[in-house]
Structure formats: C-alpha cells, structure tokens
Amino acid sequence: MMIRNLGSFAALSLLGLAACGQQEPAAAPLAPPPAATVAPAPVLEAKKEEPKPVALTAEQKVKAYQEIWSAFNAKDFAKFQAAWADNATSEMLDMGPPLVGPVAITEAGAKGFAAGFPDASGEVELTLVNGNKVAGVVLLRGTHTGTFVTPMGPVPATSKKVGFLAYQSVELNDAGKGAKEIMAYDGGTLAAQLGLTPMPHRKAIDTGWAEKPVVIASGSEAEKSNLAAFNKEVEGFNKHDAVAALGTAADDIVFSELSAPADRTGKKEAQKGMEEMFKGFPDAKLDVKSAWSAGDYVVSSGTWSGTNTGDLPAMKLKKTGKAVSVHFVEIDKFVAGKTKNVWVFMNGPAFAAQLGLMPAKTTESKAAEPKGKETKPAVAKAPPVKSEAPGKPEAGKPASALAPKAEPVAKPSPAVKAEAAPKPAAPKPAAPAPLK
C-alpha cells in the first residue's frame, strides 16, 4: 500500500506545475517495476499405497481349489480360465513341457480333455492344505465319445469308460488364483482302459471314496513327527536297507502304486518287492525335492533314479543296462505313528520307455500305408526317452493340467494314431517305478 500511495501523490503534483507554466515539464517518473510473479509451489500429493491383499484363510483356499473343479465339471470354461493367475503354469509329470498362462491351461488342458471325454468329471477324494499349497487326490472319470488329442496323434472315440486316480497340487497366490499346478497320473492306465494296449492295468474306477477328508496343516508335533519318520524311511531306502525303509510301516500297510495293476498289501510283501528292486537297480536312489505334512499325511515329490543292471524276475524282465530317472509324487498316511497307506503317482510309460521296453517309432507316413486295408487303431509307439539328472525339469512349455499336449514330447503317454499302421508287436510289460 505504501508504494501505491506515494506514486499517486507525485503524479498530481507534476500535473499542477505544468498547468501554471512555472517550469518545464519534468520527465515522467519511472513506473514502479511490476511485482515479480512467483509461481505457486506444486502441491505434492501423497502416494496412495495399494492395499495389500488380505491373507486368505485356510477355508478360502479350500473353496478356491474346489471352485476350479466345479467350473471344470460344469464345463464353465470362462470361470475355469478366470481361476488362474496371468503367469500361472501347469505341469504334468513326465508328460511333456508345462503350459503357461490361463488360456493355454484352459484350451490345451481342460478343453482338450473334455473334447475326448465330454462327460468328464473330477471328484476330489482327499484335500490337503499347507500354507498356500493345496494338494488333492482326484478321481477322473469320463466316457471316450470324442476325439482325444494326444502327443501321438488324435485317438478316435472308443466309447469306453475310464476312471483313475490322479494327483494335483495348486499353489495359490495372495488373490486366491492358481499360480502353479502340478499334476500326475499314469498314462499307461488311461491307454489300457481305452483298450489301446493289452498291458495289465487297474480297471476303471466308478465309485469314489466313502469319506473325502479335508485336512489343514497346523504345525503340530504329530505333523513334525510324521515328517521326521518319512525322512528316516527315505534315508533307509537310499542305503538299500529295506527294513529301515519300512521302519514305520504298519503290518497291514497298503501300498498303492497307481502305475501298477494292483496294490501291495502287508509289510512283508512290500519288503519283498523292495529287495527285488534293489537287485534289479543296485544304485536306486530317491531324491526328494519337497516334503510337507498336513495332519496325518505327508506329501513328497522328487525323482527316482537307477540303472537296471540286474534281472527283475517278478516282472519277467531281463536286465537292460539302461539308466532311468522319473518324477514321482507320494502321499503317506500315518495312523498312530505308523505308515498305514502309501499312494505313488508317476507316469509308467516314461519309466518303460527309458528302459527301452516301448517301440521307438512314433509315426508312420500316410502315403506308406497299404491301400485298401481297414483302418484300425494301433498301439501307440513311443520314442525312447533320454534319462535326466535327478530333479531336472524338462525345458519348454508346461504340460496340460488334464491331458498331454498335442505336440510330440520326450516322454509321451501311450496313445493311438488315427491312421492305419502295420500292427506292432505288443510291448513288454512296463515295470512300475519301484519306489519305496
């Protein structure tokens, strides 16, 4: 205000003097410089932190897992796809490379299986939860009324029913979406139930378990004790001590190796089979990569490896000299500190192929087919599989959540070609993976 008032007074005085002519007009005073304009300081807004996902409860994890199967059973593939995270992977043990992303898991996995088995369903018989990992034993059933695309080519409808147990684990992210899936089942059992191979096999299962336990890990002392007992048995196995490897086995233990045609019952029977296996594979080794417990159950996964330098009389197999390395998942159930049940999931054809028990030729040219002959499905012929270092995953894309991919892979499950082919000799019985 002071600068403005002094300027007005000076201007009026100069005008009065000029009117009287008493002196020469003075030069106009310099106008005061304009006040400097200062730009207002920018207002910095505090960064809003993204709200952290609320940790899922165990019950919410079970529900998220169950909804995956509900969507598949209803053939609601939009909902099924939405259940997977953007970077989700799905791998089938020894059935090719994994699938990556919700679209691949849905299109090549769920839809691929449903195309061959339009009435396909998955019934979860056992659910185990530990942290963000949910594992299940699933009964897969369906009628083969559509074309089933396999690594060996399309399999025309056989109208046969299938029913077999599979293992599945899904690791959930914080939003409750599937981030990593592992699935395992025996491709030989599926092929045999479809009538594609004369191999001895388990008959199609029609009815699920009477009880369907849902067990959530609590970190109890009993869980820790069960896990310690399991690790002790693995140690005994790797020392080729069958007694120590079955140290906590109940006398009436039921050993269900799903690639074998039947269970083994009783501790004595299990020990006899193990000792024979040690003779056939003197360097047999279990390399357990992961083991965790939930209630009465221990879930483990890893590789079984060995070199077949001895005969296997029970399987009527002479030594092959071949090295084998296959992946497995095992679930042990403990009752009062004793191992009561063991379920082993692996792909038997991968084991047989590495032993050289399956024909090496995978496809035959259509042009080479004899003309005029009736087209009949032929037993699939899988290529020999190179053995891997224990625990080393196969490179490439992941495998389908429910079915092998359509492109050729290193260790395919048996399947059939759609075109006619000279009938191959029936393969020798595949030795089931001799796990503990």
Image (spheres, rainbow, N blue to C red):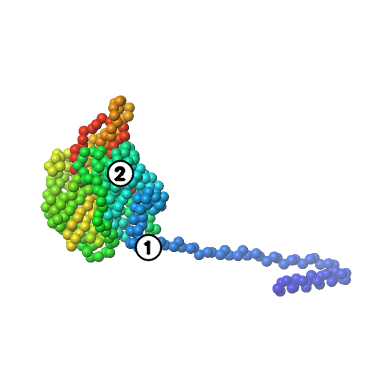
Residue 68 image offset from top left, x and y in percent: 36, 53
Look at mark 1 in the image and give the residue it sits on. 55
Residue at the spot x=25%, y=38% of the render? 196
Alpha-carbon span between mark 2 and mark 1: 40 Å
The quarter of the picture where the N terminus appears is bottom right
Residue 75 lies left or right of residue 358; in this view the side is right
Q: What residue is rendered at 20% in x and 59% in y?
A: 334
Q: Secondary structure at mark 1?
A: loop
- Name the foreground residue: 226 vs 44: 226
The residue at 13%/46% (across/down) is 276
Q: Residue furthest top?
A: 371
Residue 313, by quadrant, is top left
Residue 143 bears which disc, if any?
Answer: 2
Picture quadrant where residue 219 is located: bottom left
Task: Give the mark toward the camera: 2 or 1.
Answer: 2
Residue 378: image location, x then y, percent: 26, 34
Label 2 crowding class (10 Å Cα cut-off): few <14, some 14-19, many 20+?
Answer: many
As drawn, which residue projects farthest toward the right?
21
Q: Is residue 66 left or right of residue 238?
A: right
Instruction: Specify whether residue 187 is in view.
Output: no
